[in-house]
Amino acid sequence: MFRNLLLGLTVIAFAGAGAALAQQSGIKRTPLQKVDFPAGYNTVTAIGGASGRHSHPGAETGYVLDGELELLIDGKPPLKLKAGDSYQIPEGAVHDAKTSGEKPLKVLGVYIVKAGEPLAKPAP
């Protein structure tokens, strides 16, 4: 019985943490998993789409699952990406992902961010 209670509380805690990660900065993401690795960092895998200007306290790498996007990273030329393309965004870089095709945008992102910091921070 104690084991079932502990399992239930763990599931509830994980679901709550996932919802918090998805809602940060008004950016819609669906977290798939979070790993406390490497030391001092969290590695978060999530699915998302168009995002609005923001930055991360760590690196982001991703893969376009569906649709097309224009990736805008401050200080770099716009990058056009389509399903099957991958990308990398350096730590702290202000960026935006805008849908550029008719299909909805869907990306698989992997974020390696400093532990204790929010996954994303909005940028002006």
Image: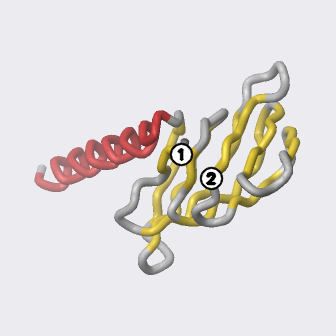
- Indicate which disc residue 123 carries: 1
Left or right: residue 29 compared with residue 1 = right
Q: Quadrant of residue 84?
A: top right
Give the alpha-carbon distance from disc 1 to disc 2, as whole Å.
7 Å
Residue visible at 52% across and 47% down in the picture: 32
* Residue linked to disc 2: 94
Indicate the amino acid at tag 1.
Answer: Ala
Residue visible at 62% across and 53% down in the picture: 94
Pick the residue in front: 76 or 45.
Answer: 76
Left or right: residue 82 compared with residue 16 = right
Question: Few, some or many C-alpha atoms within 10 Å of disc 1 (few <14, some 14-19, many ≥20)?
Answer: few
Query: Residue 44's x, y, as percent?
Result: 52, 57
Q: Quadrant of residue 48?
A: top right
Left or right: residue 28 compared with residue 73 = left
Left or right: residue 116 compared with residue 109 = left
Q: Secondary structure at mark 1?
A: loop
Is mark 1 in CB contact (under 8 Å) with mark 2?
Answer: yes
Pick the residue in front: 49 or 122.
Answer: 122
- In the rendered image, the quadrant that contains the C terminus is top right
Pick the residue in front: 117 or 62.
Answer: 117
Query: Residue 15's x, y, as percent?
Result: 35, 42
Q: Quadrant of residue 92?
A: bottom right
